[in-house]
Image (cartoon, grey):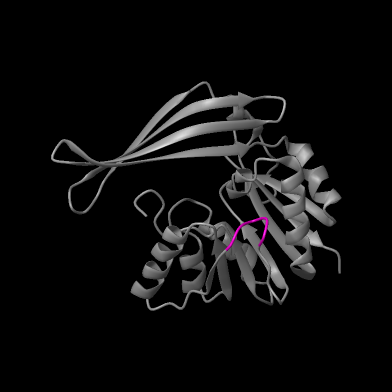
């Protein structure tokens, strides 16, 4: 929550503008702690979400409750989510889709997205450019201070880089410090698969989508650039 609290990052206005005109329910895939889902609920959008992490969902529920919001959440995975009604839109923001690190699985997830949309429904997926795969930094540290004065650090170290499969594996270590002493640690191995621009467009087509558009850094109508932090795809299920 300290890293990405509800409303953090600069994609909120983009999504509100794109989703407000739609008629029907909205699903956020990998909603996490509610960074995007909470502002969408506050704006009155009929959104629900799923995530694989129960701890992240618990934080999302707390954030919603604190704001008097009713958050409909479900614990499930990209590869397994299933709903008995179609959606007007499915949203997968800030690179969450790259956590599906196998091409065949990623295609199957896109097909699952397609099957869960209404005719004419829209898919929104944000991915990091392929350049992230070969970022020269093999060791990265981030830190935050909690309201209680504790220091939290996340140290990411690259374990594997597979250029053939466009896949990177990192070891993330989470440390909690109190009074200069380490009091708690956790480690997580995280794999991501990065995409080339036209590769992702072609994969969306293979999954059955049409009307595919992409912009750079949430600027509608502005073509992607090599310097972009995000490529923002939209795709439509045929009516």
**In the rendered structure, does residue 133 fall within the stretch colored magenta?**
no
Q: Quadrant of the N terminus?
A: bottom left
| Residue 20 point in image, percent of width and height | 61, 71
Residue shown at 34% from the left, 73% from the top: 66
| Residue extent of the magenta highlight | 76-80
Relative side of 147 to 119, left or right: left
Snapshot quadrant of residue 81: bottom right
Q: Is residue 197 above or below residue 55?
A: above
The residue lying furthest to the top in this view is 136
Left or right position of 201 against 47: right
Quarter the C terminus occupies: bottom right
Specify the principal SS of the magenta part.
loop
- Residue 108 x %, y %: 76, 52
Q: Residue at x 63, y 70 (%)?
A: 26
- Where residue 129 appears, as percent x and y from the top left, is 64, 35
Residue at left 24%, top 50%? Answer: 146
Viewer-proximal residue among 219 and 178: 178
Would residue 5 be visible to someone looking at this image?
Answer: yes
Instruction: Give the x, y percent position of residue 159.
Output: 52, 26
- Relative placement, left or right, of 204 versus 63 is right
Residue occupying the far left of the picture: 179
């Amino acid at each position: 929550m300290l890293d990405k609290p509800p409303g953090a990052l600069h994609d909120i206005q983009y999504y509100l503008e794109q989703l407000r005109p739609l008629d029907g329910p909205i699903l956020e895939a990998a909603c996490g702690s509610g960074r995007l889902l909470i502002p969408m609920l506050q704006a009155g959008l009929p959104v629900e979400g799923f995530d694989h992490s129960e701890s992240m969902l618990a934080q999302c529920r707390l954030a919603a409750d604190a704001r008097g919001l009713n958050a409909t959440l479900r614990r499930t995975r990209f590869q397994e989510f299933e709903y008995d009604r179609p959606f007007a839109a499915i949203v997968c923001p800030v690179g969450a889709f790259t956590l599906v690190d196998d091409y065949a699985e990623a295609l199957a997830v896109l097909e699952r997205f397609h099957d869960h949309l209404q005719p004419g429904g829209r898919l929104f997926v944000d991915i990091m450019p392929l350049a992230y795969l070969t970022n020269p930094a093999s060791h990265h540290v981030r830190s935050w201070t909690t309201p209680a004065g504790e220091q939290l650090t996340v140290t990411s170290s690259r374990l594997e880089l597979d250029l053939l499969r466009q896949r990177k594996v990192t070891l993330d270590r989470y440390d909690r410090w109190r009074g200069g002493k380490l009091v708690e640690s956790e480690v997580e191995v995280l794999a991501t698969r990065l995409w080339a621009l036209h590769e992702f467009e072609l994969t969306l087509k293979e999954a059955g989508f049409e009307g595919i558009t992409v912009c750079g850094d949430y600027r509608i109508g502005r073509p992607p650039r090599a310097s972009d932090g995000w490529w923002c795809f939209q795709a439509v299920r045929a009516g």
